[in-house]
RNA sequence: GCGAGAGUGGCGGAAUUGGUAUACGCACUGGAUUUAGGAUCCAGCGCCUCUGGCUUGGGGGUUCAACUCCCCCCUCUCGCACCA
């Protein structure tokens, strides 16, 4: 007998065409069903889908499809994070235009996504490089500017020489550019910033609300990044006041050690340095020191092992309580942009200060004693930073140091010399980029009016496409007169347009909201659509965005809420976050240079999309990394073949039943009863794993077990109508449960089973608890905790019957012979443990 | 150093509330079918000194019972790290 062979390509293209034609996955804003918004991080249109995308989107698609079957109105959109540097580099290399390159890539990648059968609502597709998208971002910028949440300042910035642009702090990884790994330099530049620090407290506090839905480590990383510290600011008066400046403020987390201060250290970049040293005999030496520190590589300078170096400025400050003269130093380890750029030096209780003091022979003064034992400042070999009792601290002597922190802060405040305060590690977000392929920042520079925001009615400020791409990689915008030359929106005279563009992370900070009303023309959002769809119920993506994108999006959500664009109760964009693991090959990340790239297109060609999806989901739990295995995907392919053959070989007895439609009456014979029981058990297990726990690997394994059982049962099962119904119902269950994972073959076989409406529109099956119970239960028998055998007891036997059956078992008898039974533990239906000595 | 996660067969991994450790898959072995097969179906498959004993990184503890709970230690992965 020749069976029709499984041909994934014809099946898959057929159903993909069907979905497209019927608009199967478009969704309406509305309230007739509970909503569910599942979103995967949108890709950068590099031109090719890689295995990481396939896995990410396969996970999202299973969630989307299974939630639809569970009766939710599911929003599952896709789009393109389309601005960014690679387009410019590729344009230079391939002598094309970033715009052409980007749109070509989008077309190619959209085709590949469609070839994988993902259930997106393509009508909501967005591309961030389109003016219809970024015009709203320009509007947000203007509103943020109005509110003081966007501002311009000159400061040392992270500069990537290879990318010819600045980077935000979050985009510098180990002193290197996050994108190209070049060493980042420091450059003084005037740049646009978003005041993310204004939301520091809220960003930190609201992490608590995410604890249920986000991975702990992502929350920990964000908490770490925000880095709130509690302490005090302390004002030290200058011994000799400067023009208009009579004191220097420091921030400390240890106000309790204030009496141990023996020096103050300023960052070499501190604004007062030049004034302080003006009349100092060794001013030139200090200037040379400052020069050296500033030139030093950021990575080296921030390295903990780098030698701490400093130099005396010749100036002194006065202790706020004792009035003692304290020398003012500069130190290469002091950060200019944290706190006030000045720290108090307490060598006895801070390891850094200790090393510094020893190096430059500065005094060490012990003011905290660990539980009464005194330490001598001469013999100390390292700082003591633990808890203790304050000593030599004036009125505070004798206090516990925790208590002392509060007391000192209060006394400082009373004396007008400081107060309790907090500091954040988080810095404001530099959003200026000296690049072409991005959204223009909508401001102009006017000789008369200065920095002038564009008028909202002039938006969008369209990025000109007719520019000459420069070979050296620099932005062509400053050399494009038609763009630069403009009218001042305020006075109407000729002015110069800002040529920096927005960091592309700005686009991805709000795209999830735009999907709710992607085609809206006269406003960024439809308030009703946002209220209905947001927040995103399930967000899925790589953990590499734990800080960058996820922090920026959280910030934007709060800022847009306060600007009135987002619903007032909406503070967090993503309720649940799944960070999927990487797809590796031979133990390491796939990369062209290692030559270990597995191409999704090749795999689809060889096995079909269903097999590729199945393997990505079955190989490992979603959040874990997994190693691509050639024999692994063979196994996935084999399983799909097994379903196909089972169906084809048994089709003569298949009836158009739905999942779990065979009744208890249909299951008369022991084999039929058994198969129906396994069917219902599978539905129970698979539902929990796929829908509630997102454990797709075990969900799939449970269906594999059912398929294996069907292979073994089919010979024993007769051809009576009732038995055929039981078998058909089980087949329908297999197809229904797997349809979110391998939708094409399931739709195909569903149709061949005789159904006229698609499987995607079916409800998720419900199991009958009564059908899952066994007639006979296998009870484990233990003697002193060791397994000695099993015994079968009828379902519903009570504890004493179970105990009796256990004691009567020969296996148990053999082991308790000659011993006294002390205790019998009975776990009903599961186990009997006999304690005998 | 700080924070988070992980450690189970030859391999990827199961075990949801403390109750038969190793589900499912891969690899391997054998059988059936076949002209043949790298296709398919069936079976076997933790380790050992094998009528028994041992086994979830190591060591202790709680318990009738521990992969699971508690304490100590080891190893690996990721993130942060001169933030005063």
Image (tube, grey):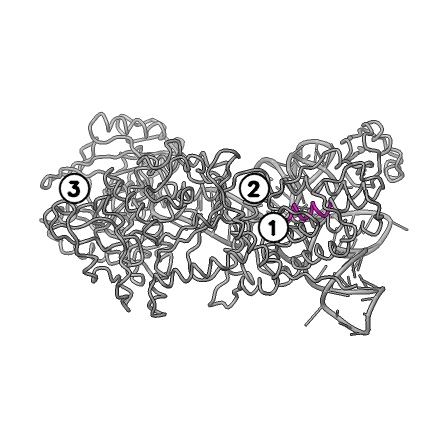
For the record, the magenta segment spans A730-743
**Which of these two is toward me, B72 or A791?**
A791
Looking at the image, tell me whether mark 3 or mark 1 is earlier in sequence order. Answer: 3
Relative vertical location of residue A401 with respect to residue A659 in this rendering, above or below: above
Q: Is residue A782 visible?
A: no
* Alpha carbon distance from label 3 to label 2: 71 Å
> Residue A388 in the image: x percent, y percent?
38, 32
User: Along the horizontal axis of the image, is A714 left or right of A499?
Assistant: right
Label 2 sits on a secondary structure element that is helix
Q: Which quadrant is the N terminus of chain A positioned in?
A: bottom right
> Residue A671 in the image: x percent, y percent?
83, 44
User: Along the horizontal axis of the image, is A159 left or right of A586?
Assistant: left
- Chain of the residue that carries numbered disc 1 in the rendered image: A
Looking at the image, tell me whether mark 2 or mark 1 is earlier in sequence order. Answer: 2
Which residue is the site of mark 2? A68
Does the magenta portion include A731?
Answer: yes
- Chain of the residue that carries numbered disc 3 in the rendered image: A
Mark 3 nearby-residue class (10 Å; few <14, some 14–19, many ≥20): many
Which residue is the site of mark 3? A316
Relative vertical location of residue A470 with respect to residue B61 in this rendering, above or below: below
> Residue A420 in the image: x percent, y percent?
29, 30
Does the magenta portion include A424?
Answer: no
């Amino acid at each position: 007998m020749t069976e029709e062979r499984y041909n994934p390509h014809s099946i898959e293209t057929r159903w993909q065409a069907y979905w497209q034609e019927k608009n199967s996955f478009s969704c309406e804003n509305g309230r007739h069903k509970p909503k569910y918004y599942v979103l995967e991080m949108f890709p950068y249109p590099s031109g090719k889908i890689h295995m990481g995308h396939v896995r990410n989107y396969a996970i999202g698609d299973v969630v989307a499809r299974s939630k639809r079957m569970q009766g939710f109105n599911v929003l599952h959109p896709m789009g393109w994070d389309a601005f960014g540097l690679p387009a410019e580099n590729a344009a230079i290399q391939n002598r094309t235009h970033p715009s052409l390159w980007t749109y070509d890539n989008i077309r190619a990648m959209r085709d590949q996504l469609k070839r994988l059968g993902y259930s997106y609502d393509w009508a909501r597709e967005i591309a961030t490089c389109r003016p219809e998208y970024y015009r709203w971002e320009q509007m947000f910028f203007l509103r943020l500017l109005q509110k003081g949440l966007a501002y311009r300042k000159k400061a040392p910035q992270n500069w990537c020489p290879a990318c010819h642009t600045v980077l935000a702090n979050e985009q510098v990884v180990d002193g290197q550019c996050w994108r190209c790994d070049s060493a980042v330099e420091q450059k003084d530049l005037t740049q646009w910033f978003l005041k993310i620090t204004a939301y520091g407290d809220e960003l930190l506090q609201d992490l608590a609300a995410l604890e249920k839905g986000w991975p702990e480590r992502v929350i920990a990383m964000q908490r770490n990044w925000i880095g709130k510290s509690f302490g005090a600011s302390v004002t030290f008066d200058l011994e000799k006041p400067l023009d208009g400046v009579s004191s220097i403020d420091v921030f400390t987390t240890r106000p309790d050690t204030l009496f141990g201060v023996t020096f103050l250290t300023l960052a070499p970049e501190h604004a007062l340095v030049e004034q302080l040293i003006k009349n100092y005999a060794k001013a030139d030496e200090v200037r040379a020191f400052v020069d050296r520190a500033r030139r030093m590589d950021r990575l080296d300078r921030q390295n903990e092992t780098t030698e701490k170096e400093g130099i005396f400025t010749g100036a002194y400050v006065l202790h706020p309580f004792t009035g003692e003269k304290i020398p003012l130093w500069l130190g290469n380890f002091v950060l200019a942009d944290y706190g006030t750029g000045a720290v108090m030096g307490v060598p006895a209780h801070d390891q850094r200060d200790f090393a510094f003091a020893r190096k430059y022979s500065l005094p060490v003064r012990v003011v905290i004693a660990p539980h009464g034992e005194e330490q001598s400042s001469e013999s100390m070999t390292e700082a003591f930073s633990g808890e203790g009792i304050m000593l030599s601290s004036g009125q505070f002597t004798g206090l516990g140091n925790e208590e002392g922190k509060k007391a000192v802060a209060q006394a400082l405040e009373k004396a007008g010399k400081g107060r309790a305060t907090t500091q954040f590690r988080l810095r404001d977000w530099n959003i200026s980029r000296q690049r072409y392929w991005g959204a223009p920042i909508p401001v102009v520079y006017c000789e008369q009016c200065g920095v002038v925001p564009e008028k909202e009615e002039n938006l969008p400020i369209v990025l000109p496409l007719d520019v000459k791409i420069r070979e050296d990689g620099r932005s062509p915008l400053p050399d494009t007169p038609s763009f630069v030359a403009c009218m001042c929106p305020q006075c109407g005279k000729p002015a110069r347009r800002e040529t920096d563009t927005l960091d592309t992370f700005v686009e991805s900070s709000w795209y999830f909201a735009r999907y709710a009303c992607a085609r809206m023309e006269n406003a960024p959002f439809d308030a009703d659509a946002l209220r209905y769809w947001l927040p995103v119920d399930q967000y899925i993506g790589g953990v590499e965005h734990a800080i960058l994108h996820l922090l920026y999006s959280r910030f934007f959500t709060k800022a847009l809420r306060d600007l009135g664009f987002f619903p007032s109760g909406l503070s967090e964009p993503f309720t649940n976050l799944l960070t999927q693991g990487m797809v590796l090959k031979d133990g390491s990340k796939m990369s062209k240079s290692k030559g270990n790239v597995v191409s999704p297109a090749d795999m689809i060609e060889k096995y079909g999309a269903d097999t590729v999806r199945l393997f990505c989901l079955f190989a490992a739990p979603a959040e874990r990394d997994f190693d691509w295995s050639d024999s692994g995907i063979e196994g996935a392919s084999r399983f799909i073949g097994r379903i196909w053959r089972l169906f084809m070989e048994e089709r003569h007895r298949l009836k158009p039943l739905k999942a779990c439609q065979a009744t208890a009456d249909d299951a008369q014979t022991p084999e039929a009863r058994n198969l129906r029981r396994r069917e219902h058990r599978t539905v129970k297990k698979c539902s929990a794993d796929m829908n509630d726990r997102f454990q797709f690997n075990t969900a799939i394994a449970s269906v594999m077990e059912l398929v294996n059982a069907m292979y073994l049962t089919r010979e024993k099962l007769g051809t009576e109508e009732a038995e055929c119904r039981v078998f058909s119902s089980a087949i329908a269950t297999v197809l229904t449960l797997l349809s979110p994972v391998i939708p094409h073959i399931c739709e195909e076989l569903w149709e061949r089973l005789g159904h006229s409406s698609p499987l995607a529109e079916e409800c998720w099956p419900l199991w009958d608890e009564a059908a899952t119970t066994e007639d006979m239960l296998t009870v484990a028998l233990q003697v002193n905790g060791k397994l000695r055998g099993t015994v079968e007891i009828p379902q519903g036997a009570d504890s004493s019957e179970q105990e009796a059956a256990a004691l009567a078992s020969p296996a148990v008898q053999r082991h308790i012979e000659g011993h006294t039974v002390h205790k019998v533990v009975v776990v009903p239906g599961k186990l009997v443990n006999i304690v005998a000595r």
